[in-house]
Amino acid sequence: MASRHVTNERPSRVAASSFLADLHGEHREHLLRFTRRLLPGDPHRAEDVVQECMLRAWRHQEQLAAEGVMVRSWLFTVARNLIVDWIRRDKARPVIFGDDDFDLLPGGGADFADEVVSRCVVDEGLARLTPTQRQALEQVYRLDRTRQGAAAVIGVPVGTIKSRVHNATIAMTEALAGHGVTAACW
């Protein structure tokens, strides 16, 4: 591109078209190989980078046509910067799932929103319990211990565990009912 002569006049459409055609013919293949090396496995994005480089070169054709400008170096720098920006943007954005991708998530495609709401309601109900009631429920229901085993671990009489579990069950039932969850929903 060093053979191009520059005037102070604004380039005409024919000159702009010729500039872009020359640029494309001389640099596209080299630029495409470069971008494909930086983006292995994503040839479509490599093509997008090349197109964006050509567009930016067209917008800056007066500067690129100046004497001594290394056009290929400029294109490669722009391509590298575009790729770095896209990679950073992709890392900063959350992964987007399509409708079909939810079957791949844990739970076999069950409604995540309902599960999250249910966990929040249960957590809120557990927060209303006293620490001793939570401890009794954890021993009996989460760790699947008998009331005698829970009493032995906690170090209280069996009757105390039975009472704590009973009162905790009532408190949880009330807390869940406050959110529209009844025993029929369990």
Image (spheres, rainbow, N blue to C red):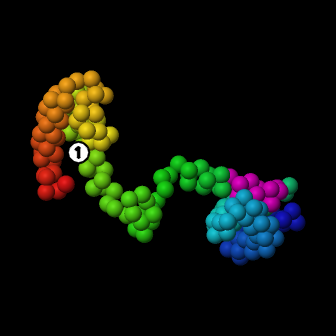
Q: Main secondary structure of the magenta part?
A: helix
Please tell me in which quadrant of the rendered image residue 127 appears.
top left
Please, is residue 180 above or below residue 45 in the view?
above
Q: How many marks?
A: 1
Other-residue count near label 1 (Cα within 10 Å), few / some / many at <14 / 14–19 / ≥20: many
Q: Is residue 79 above or below residue 25?
A: above
Q: Nearer the viewer, residue 56 or 77?
A: 77
- Apparent side of residue 172 relative to residue 141 in the rendered image (left or right): left
Task: Identify the residue at horizontal 80%, vertical 60% (top origin).
Answer: 72
Amino acid at dot 1: Val
**Where, quadrant-wise, is the N terminus in this rendering?**
bottom right
Residue drawn at point x = 39 percent, y = 63 percent: 108
Identified at 32% across, 60% down, the residue is 111
Per the rendered image, the range of residues in magenta is: 69-81
Asked where in the image residue 79 lies, by quadrant, the reply is bottom right
Q: Is residue 12 visible?
A: no
Q: Which residue is mark 1?
A: 121
128 on left or right of 76:
left
Give the answer, above or below, for where 126 lies relative to 44: above
Q: Position of residue 156 (x, y in %)?
A: 22, 24
> Is residue 144 shown to the viewer in this render?
yes
Q: Residue at x 13, y 52 (%)?
A: 182
Secondary structure type for disc 1: helix
